[in-house]
Image (spheres, helix red, strand yellow):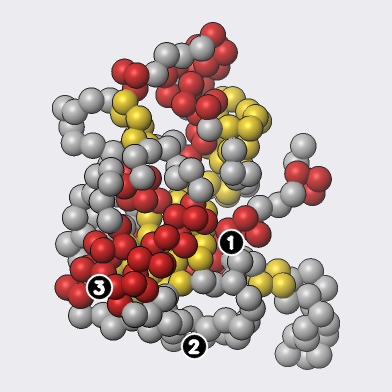
Amino acid sequence: MTSSTTIKATALPDFPDVKAGDDLAALIGEGLGRANIEVAARDVIVVAQKIVSKTEGRKIALADVKPSPRATEIAAKALKDPRLVELILSESQNVLRVVPNVIVVRHRLGFVLANAGIDRSNVGPPGGEESALLLPLDPDSSAARIRDGIAARLGVAPAVVITDSFGRAWRLGTVNVAIGVAGLPALVDRRGTLDRYGRTLETTEVAFADAVAAAAGLAMGEGAEGRPVVHMSGLEWSAPAQSANALIRPIAEDLFR
């Protein structure tokens, strides 16, 4: 990996609300056109998980969810809707911690996060049915499909990163991280290379896709901005492309359990 001295992140303007079945690659292509952005092969398109989940039909009406006894028990401890807890359990390998307002789980995809990444903000208009949005079934495959769709329309295949907002152990606040990656290295191993004084790096691994996601998050915003797609240019890398799965720490290396 080589460092970049200038990186540009541009949120696509006037991106429409999406619904299940929409062609996200086509909408991104149209958004790039409105912004007069010419895409190069080493550019990156960063896409918020929320619109990916919506187009893939991952929106669930809570009225259709029947909570189990276990969900009801956990909901009482977490002060949450038992139907929402049932969805959290359905998306999780196991529950790691339950406190008021937060359920920390290991997601079926391997992520450790609050509430299985299930969200109710910006899911639907006020007054509509109560619903929740689950993470994509396979975010890496979603990123690859979006990349292929953009390439088919524009004749060039930029990298694609799908992001979500995660909390971090021991630090307040959330930051965008990569949950799906296509066309760039998710993790860059710098071990064995030299620092500027000739010392060999022994432990340095760079979460490159997470850094891309966090930078794009500054352009996206976290509330009502309505900017779910960001075009980034100026990034450089030489490591081979990987999926986001490369960023997940193996359970055997879990330092906190």
Q: Which residue is mark 1?
A: 243
Determine the secondary structure under disc 3.
helix
The answer to which quarter of the image holds residue 97 is: top right
- Frontmost of labels 2 and 3 is 3
Q: CA distance from mark 2 to mark 3?
A: 24 Å
Q: Position of residue 14 (x, y in %)?
A: 17, 62
Q: Going by the image, does 251 lie left or right of 241? A: right
Q: Is residue 169 left or right of residue 204?
A: left
Name the amino acid, label 3. Answer: Leu
Q: Residue at x 34, y 80 (%)?
A: 155
Residue at x-position 34% and y-position 40%? 57
Quarter the N terminus occupies: bottom right
Residue on which the image places disc 2: 5
Asked whether the beta carbons under mark 2 and mark 1 sit within 8 Å of each other, the answer is: no
Do labels 2 and 3 touch, CB within 8 Å? no
The amino acid beneath tag 1 is Ser
**Residue 153 in sight:** yes
Asked whether disc 1 touches disc 3, contact meaning CB atoms under 8 Å apart, the reply is: no
Point out the residue furthest to the bottom here: 197
Question: Which residue is identified by label 3?
Answer: 32
Between disc 1 and disc 3, whose residue precedes?
3
Whether 125 is drawn above or below 16: the answer is above
Camera-nearest residue between 163 and 97: 163
Q: Amino acid at mark 2?
A: Thr
Give me the residue at 38% from left, 38% from top. 58
Mark pair 1, 3: CA separation:
24 Å
In percent of width and height, residue 145 lies at 42, 60
Q: Name the N-terminal-most of marks 2 and 3.
A: 2
